[in-house]
Image: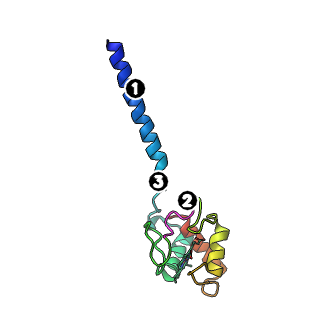
């Protein structure tokens, strides 16, 4: 009798564990953004450039759209909003050439600034 109770208890525990596992897979959790006061100088520079050039259209620290899609966890997610691969190359091309409603910004940011921007976007 005791043994049976134990088996039932183990069974319930097992089902609970499986449900937890399924829930964990269904809801993806990305790491939270690195706190602003912990950014290195290049990332901090990228943050300033983001504020000046991108923030009017994109949130990057909350997962909500503004005039464009959120860039929160942009390099943790498997793809960009468009479905393109979330790579430095693709994000650089988006900045230089624009994309859909996003204007081309190649004349507003130089190569060094793009490197800083990417370094910052890797922290969110
Ligand atoms: C005037 C508004 C505006 C500004 C400024 C802007 N964006 Fe965008 N951005 C958009 C819009 C709108 C989209 C969605 C485009 C679409 O899918 O049609 C977008 C899309 C993107 C995407 C996703 C591209 C894809 O393939 O899904 C990235 C990455 C991005 N922007 C980065 C940036 C960065 C970095 C900056 C600053 C240098 C910036 N944006 C400045 C409006 C803007």
* Residue at the disc numbered 1: 11
Q: Nearer the viewer, residue 112 or 85?
A: 85
User: Bounds of the magenta span?
Assistant: 70-75
Q: Is residue 41 above or below residue 79?
A: below
Q: Earlier in the sequence, mark 2 or mark 1?
A: 1
Question: Which of 42/81 is in front?
Answer: 81
Which dot marks residue 89? Answer: none
**Residue 29, labelled with which disc?**
3
Which x, y percent locates residue 86? 61, 64
Q: Assess whether residue 17 is covered by the magenta stretch.
A: no
Residue 93 vertical placement versus 76 (above, below): below
Which label lies toward us, 1 or 3?
1
Residue 71 colored in magenta in the image: yes
Question: Is the residue indicated by label 1 positioned so its CB lies within 8 Å of ligand 1?
Answer: no
User: In what quadrant does ligand 1 lie?
Assistant: bottom right
Q: Which mark is residue 76?
A: 2
Q: Are marks 2 and 3 in contact (CB under 8 Å)?
A: no
| Main SS of residues in magenta | loop
């Amino acid at each position: 009798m005791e043994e049976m109770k134990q088996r039932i208890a183990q069974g319930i525990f097992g089902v609970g564990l499986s449900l937890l596992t399924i829930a964990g897979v269904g809801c993806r959790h990305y790491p939270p953004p690195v706190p602003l006061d912990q950014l290195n100088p290049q990332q901090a520079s990228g943050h300033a450039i983001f504020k000046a050039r991108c923030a009017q259209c994109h949130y990057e620290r909350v997962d909500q759209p503004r005039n464009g899609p959120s860039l929160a966890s942009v390099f943790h997610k498997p793809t960009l909003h468009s479905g393109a691969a979330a790579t430095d190359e693709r994000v650089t091309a988006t900045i230089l050439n624009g994309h859909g409603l996003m204007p081309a910004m190649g004349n507003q940011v130089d190569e060094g600034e793009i490197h800083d921007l990417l370094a910052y976007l890797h922290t969110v």
